Amino acid sequence: MLPPFQASPCRFVGLSDCGRVRANNEDAIAIANELGLAVLADGMGGYNAGEVASAMAADEVVRALRTALPGVTSPEGLDQAVRASVAQANQAVWQAAAEHPQYRGMGTTLVLLLLDGAEACIAHVGDSRAYRLRNGRLQPLTRDHSVVQEQVEAGLVTPERARHLPYRNLLTHALGVESTVQPDLARHAVEPGDLYLLCSDGLHDMLSDEEITALLLRSATPGDAARALVDAANAAGGQDNISIILAQCTPDPAHRSEKCPR
Ligand code: CA
């Protein structure tokens, strides 16, 4: 039996910007430092429905995990709690869309990062991403649920060209558009100095991974880095809403041997 879930003592920094083209910001970010939890969602739908979907999804995930995490005592329990939180968010958005004609067809992406003493748990649906900067290298930790991602994997387009295709935002999975959704979920061992980045496509469509890496390495603090990334995405056109969450963490060695056997 492991000790109850303990949030990592790491601090999150979040920034959400409308960009230079869109009238509304349909992205939502939610940070619960006491839970070691950050959630980022990128909504879609007519009128203000995208904003409703993304805010509802982010809030529901935080609410569900706030209730569930104190009772979690195993990695499997953590996975279950995360999956249940995404299911609860999906249900809330799906139901609101079914009950209110103005919200019909709304949906959202979702990416969440949950940090305990030793591990980063990441779950996602759609094309909002998680990355990790370690030893100067930026590594994607999620795989977009999008049509272009499938084409990249089939060798039909290069990743660089994929960023510029007009249908790059076409998703294969989204939250709230069907009665159930299966998020991808992964856990990674945290190393000292790791920097985690969550972002919406308004960042990764505007900047290459190399440009993102350079800006992260050049910034003195996560707060400076978030500002620099938003400014660079806007300088590159700001064609969509830009949202970023950064977390720099120090793992707790006491947890490592139990939770991340090597
Ligand atoms: Ca977007």
Image (cartoon, rainbow, N blue to C red):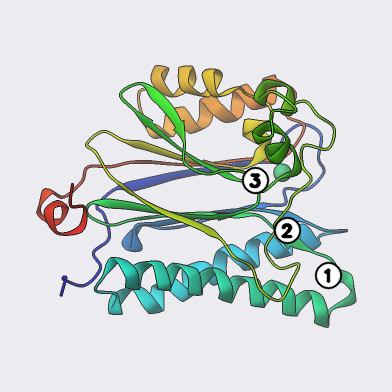
Tell me the residue that label 2 is attached to.
51
What is the quadrant of the N terminus in the image?
Answer: bottom left
User: x and y percent of residue 232 in the render?
Assistant: 61, 22
Instruction: Check mark 2 vs ligand 1: CB closer than 8 Å? yes or no.
Output: no
Nearest to N terminus: mark 3 or mark 2: 2
Amino acid type shown at disc 2? Glu
Q: How many marks?
A: 3
Q: Gap between marks 1 and 3, in whole Å?
A: 21 Å
Q: Is residue 256 left or right of residue 67?
A: left
**Residue at 27% over, 44% down:** 190
Amino acid type shown at disc 1? Tyr
Marks 1,3: beta carbons within 8 A: no
**Residue at 70% over, 58% down:** 174
The numbered mark at residue 195 is: none
**Residue at 39% over, 20% down:** 217
**Residue at 72% over, 48% down:** 25
Which class describes the residues within 10 Å of circle 3: few (<14), some (14-19), or many (20+)? Answer: many
Q: Say whether residue 29 is visible.
A: no
Nearest to N terminus: mark 2 or mark 1: 2
As drawn, 146 above or below 44: above
The numbered mark at residue 103 is: 1
User: x and y percent of residue 185 in the render?
Assistant: 47, 57
Nearest to N terminus: mark 1 or mark 3: 1
Q: Say whether residue 151 is visible.
A: yes
Q: From this viewpoint, which residue is outermost toward the bottom?
A: 99
Res 90 → quadrant = bottom right
Tell me the residue that label 3 is attached to.
127
Q: Is residue 205 left or right of residue 193?
A: right
Amino acid type shown at disc 3? Asp
